[in-house]
Amino acid sequence: MTYFITGIGTEIGKTVSSAIVVEALEADYWKPIQAGELEYSDSQKVKDLISNTKSQFHAESYRLKLPMSPHAAAQKESITIELSKCQLPKTKNALVVEGAGGLLVPLNDKDCIIDLIKELNIEVILISQHYLGSINHTLLSIEALKNRNIPIKGILFNGEENKDTEHIILSKSGLGSLGRIPQMKTVNKAAIKEVAEQLKGAF
């Protein structure tokens, strides 16, 4: 069981969502490309949020210094990101892979995050969060994935409920909801574990 966690844009809650799925499945975690925040990477954040002792954390393929789009951060360091160098870690455990930004975030002059997902050939969990324009962004993300024949496990909604928005997204896309991550006052191990217990059946 391997999932790629991607979102309909940036700051959608991919890292917290990844931590919840990791905790629910006691899965391994891998972030292929980390751009910026090397002193406290997403891998470290997820590690600090989970309670189980089974999960293993695999090294990034690329660790870029600047908090920019990966292609731009790589250019600043005279690096070219190559999909072939982003190989799935070898593990017998379930694996959660976290992307960077949205699907069309560029990695180099040719490839985007969606091309990396296609290369890895794994199922997607799409994180959606409600804001003005989120229906459009969610449906466009789904259409892009379907156009490349990338399998989608379902949509995981993050934050406050909006029944009308969720209904139209699910009805138009034909996808199922994996549940909701509630608005958490404090994001810590206890909160992540509680939500993971509630959602584990969805994954």
Image (cartoon, rainbow, N blue to C red):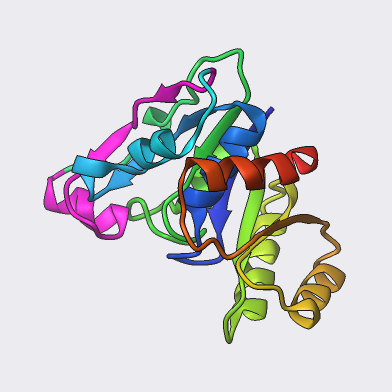
Place residue 10 in its image quadrant: bottom left
Q: Nearer the viewer, residue 157 or 133?
A: 157
Q: Nearer the viewer, residue 21 or 95?
A: 21
Q: Residue visible at 50% across and 50% down?
A: 16
Report how many numbered discs are placed on residues in the image.
Answer: 0
- Taking 175 as reference, is 145 left or right? left
Note whether 88 is above or below 126 in the view shown.
above
Q: Residue visible at 56% across and 65% down?
A: 8
User: Is any part of residue 116 visible from this angle?
Assistant: yes
Place residue 173 in its image quadrant: bottom right
Place residue 126 in its image quadrant: bottom right
User: Is any part of residue 31 visible from this angle?
Assistant: no
User: Does the magenta portion include 67?
Assistant: yes
Residue 42 position within the rendered picture, expressed as x and y whole percent measured from the top left: 36, 43
Residue 33 position within the rendered picture, expressed as x and y whole percent measured from the top left: 35, 41
Note whether 189 is above or below 136 in the view shown.
above
Image: magenta residue range: 54-78
Q: What is the quadrant of the C terminus in the image? A: top right
- Taking 176 as reference, is 160 left or right? left
Extreme-left residue of the structure: 77
Q: What is the quadrant of the N terminus in the image? A: top right
Note whether 43 is above or below 169 in the view shown.
above
User: Does the magenta portion include 203?
Assistant: no
- Taking 174 as reference, is 110 left or right? left
Residue 41 position within the rendered picture, expressed as x and y whole percent measured from the top left: 30, 42
- Taking 72 as reference, is 125 left or right? right
Residue 157 position within the rendered picture, expressed as x and y whole percent measured from the top left: 67, 62
Q: Residue visible at 78% across and 43% down?
A: 202
Q: Residue visible at 64% across and 72% down?
A: 160
